[in-house]
Image (tube, helix red, strand yellow):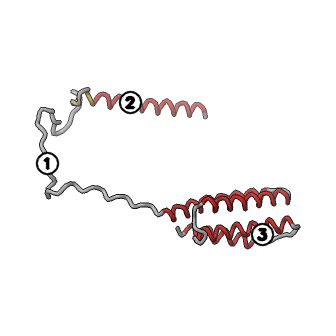
Amino acid sequence: MRVIRILSLVAVAGLLGLGNAACVSTVSGHATAASDLQSPGGLPTGTDSPTDTASPSGDPTPTDPPSPTPDPVKTKEQVTCVLVQATVKSTNDKFNAAKTRDTQVGILTGGRNGVQANLTKSGLAHSDRIYVLGSGIYNELRKLVSSAKAGGSPSTTPYNNATNKFRTACLSL
């Protein structure tokens, strides 16, 4: 495996060297063509005087239209979606791998705090639908933690439904 990697690196370096050599042999210093360059139609010699040429219609050359300004609210929503969904995935993966109830409760608590932090830092209005749906995830995690700490066995269905609604809303952005 190492031999193949070394041979690959040597081959790439050789190709880069050949590419450099090809570039060097076609251009001579002072903006003149190298003697070994063969170009159909010839090249300008540099002795001709420059001429101004207008566009065929006489109008100035059109410029590219300005790129549209991104919607700051949509951008905040998209960033919030990515962060909250990453927190949910991490929480779910850790929760499913946990061996003890105390560990699971700790993971749910961390997930709840992470979702809350993402929403707080999002800059979204509390009435924004992404914020509202993210708050739904936070509330379901809060209920899970509260019930589990009290010794209950809460259902994860409401939490899963909240995460699915959030994901669906994020996909529609």
Pointer 3: residues within 10 angstroms few (<14), some, or many (20+)?
A: some
Q: Which mark is residue 88?
A: none
Q: Nearer the viewer, mark 2 or mark 3?
A: 3
* Secondary-structure class at tag 3: helix
User: 156 or 97, which lies in front?
Assistant: 156
Tell me which amino acid carries mark 2: Leu
Q: Look at the numbered discs 1 and 2 and tell me whether their residues touch, using CB distance below 8 Å.
A: no
Label 2 or label 3, whichever comes before in sequence order: 2
Q: Which mark is residue 143?
A: 3
Q: Position of residue 98 (x, y in %)?
A: 80, 56
* Marks 1/2: CA–CA distance: 39 Å
Which is more toward the observer, 10 or 48?
48
How far is the residue under mark 3 from the one under mark 1?
74 Å
- Whole-percent x, y for residue 30 in the image: 23, 27
- Residue 95 drawn above or below residue 153: above
List x then y, in percent, for residue 71.
Answer: 47, 64
39 is higher (above) or lower (below) than 21:
below
The front one of 17 and 102 is: 102
**71 relative position to 82: left or right:** left
Could you say which quadrant of the image residue 42 lies in? top left
The quarter holding residue 129 reads bottom right
Residue where numbered disc 2 is placed: 18
- Residue at numbered disc 1: 53
Q: Give the residue drawn at x 67%, y 59%.
A: 117
Instruction: Name the residue located 46 percent from the left edge and 33 percent from the top edge.
Output: 12
Label 2: how many residues lie within 10 Å, few (<14), some (14-19) or many (20+)?
Answer: few
Residue type, numbered disc 3: Lys
Is the Cβ of the residue at disc 3 closer than 8 Å to that at disc 1? no
